Every structure is written in structure tokens, then in C-alpha cells.
Amino acid sequence: MHMGSLNMHIAILMTNTDESAFAQAHPKDGEKFTTLLHMARPAWQTTVYPVKDGEFPADISAYDGAMITGSPASTRSGAAWVAQLLELIRQMHALKLPLFGACFGHQAIALALGGRIDDLPGGWVHGRTENHLAARPQWARELPDVVSIYGSHVEYVRDLPAGALPLMERAGITTGFTLGDHIATTQHHPEMTHAFICALTEEMRTELGPEVYARAMASLEEPADQPALAEAIARFFEAR
């Protein structure tokens, strides 16, 4: 059991394969997730591993926990780095190391531990999403009943791994789960700022199509619950 929030050191496993001009013009995911943690716990340390380039921690147990970021890549791609990440997830699960996954991370944890990923019925979900809390672990006690998180996904966790419990739900699908007290996930992006999701929506306008784009823009008139999410994630790591 770690004492409070003193000197926590979190590994950020960066999976985002986007190297476009758009990506270069914005903070990278390692920085975004570090900023998210620092909203709640400014003294915490992070070390970023670009696992999408095959760069993995030599010893994951040296960290107090890990976070897996989002990515336009598919967990079902069969890429060598994805296979290596799935194996690392199984190792972290065996160690009961606190692990938080967002978007690709959520799907990768599910897949690694026996869940199923599928294409999202109805295509893209993009913008501010409203997620109903299906459970309220102690660390999530101050989250609202409906949590607003920016999201962008076209795949989803169809079947949870054995022993996993829904944490959040939206439109009939599980958008976050817990497994034991050492795994927590969200399908969405707690690290995204309002400015970033707005820029991403413009960047993806053609890919999303006019209907999804219009829905996304309308949804972005209200902010997400980012500070509350940052606090909940910090408490998740401290709960161990």
C-alpha cells in the first residue's frame, strides 16, 4: 500500500500512431496524460514509453502504476507492438499493478484478458459523450452520476473479460470497466482538452461525415468533467 500521493511514479504507455502534421502541432499523448494527472497531483512523476515504436519498460513493476493511451490503431491489427502490449497487460494483471486504460487502452486491456472487440454499430461516436456510472468504486465517489468525457471511437468492447464489472455505460454499450481493484478503464479520452477535441473534430470532418460532425460540434457546446476525472484517476492509483 502506497502512502497517500507521495512520490507516485506512473508509466505512460503511449500507443498513438498519428505522426501527421496535425499531431505535430498539438501536445503528444504522453504530455496530455501527464497534464491530466498533474491537474490532481502536481508532484507525481511520469515516464512515457512510446510502445507503438516498440519501446517498452524494462521492468514495469518499478512503477506505482501504468496508463495506456488512445490511438487510431486497432487492437485487432496483429502488429508486433500490439501483441507485446497485450502480453505486458497480462503481466501487469498478474502483478495486480494499478492499470488505467483510455480508448485504445480500454480495448487492449479487454482483449488481453479475454474480452472481445468489435466495430461500433452505427459507426463513429465523436465529441462530448455522456456516460452513466454503472458502479461507484470508492475512488470514483465524487464523480457525477452522468460523466461527460470527450470521445472518438469506431470500435468498442463487445464482451468484457471474465470477472470485469461495468463502470460506465452509454447507449447500451459498456464504456468503462473495472477488474479487481487494480484495473479501471474508459472508452473515452479524459486527457483531451476542449480546444483539442474541437481541433480534432475539424481535422476529422471528412472522415466523420456531415451528420456525425454536426452532432459532435453541437455536443462540444458543453464542457467535459475533466477535473473530476483527473481526481478520480489519481484516487484510483492511491487506493492500492
Image (cartoon, rainbow, N blue to C red):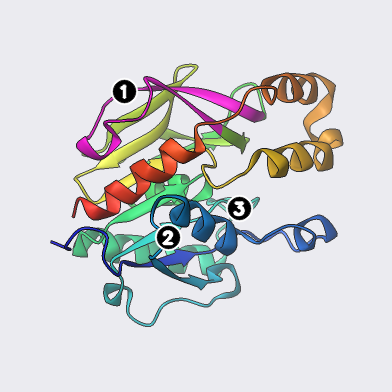
In which quarter of the view is residue 140 placed? top left
Q: Residues within 10 Å of mark 1 (few under 14, many from 20)?
A: some
The amino acid sitting under disc 2 is Pro
Q: Nearer the viewer, residue 2 or 97?
A: 2
Span shown in magenta: 125-149
> What is the distance, in whole Å, between disc 1 and disc 3 at their CAs?
25 Å
Disc 2: which residue: 42
- In the rendered structure, does residue 165 fall within the stretch colored magenta? no
* Mark 3 or mark 2, earlier in chain: 2
Q: Nearer the viewer, mark 3 or mark 2?
A: 2
Q: Nearer the viewer, mark 1 or mark 2?
A: 2
Would you place residue 162 above or below residue 100 in this image?
A: above
Q: Residue furthest bottom?
A: 58
Is residue 236 visible from the viewing direction of this image?
Answer: yes
* Mark 1 or mark 2, earlier in chain: 2
Q: What label does residue 134 carry, if any? A: 1
Q: Nearer the viewer, residue 46 or 170?
A: 46
Left or right: where 94 falls relative to 46? left
In the rendered image, residue 79, in percent from the top left (x then y), is placed at 57, 64
Q: At 50% across and 60% down in the image, what residue appears? A: 34
Q: What label does residue 71 carry, if any? A: 3
Q: What label does residue 177 carry, if any? A: none
In the rendered image, residue 72, in percent from the top left (x then y), is placed at 65, 50
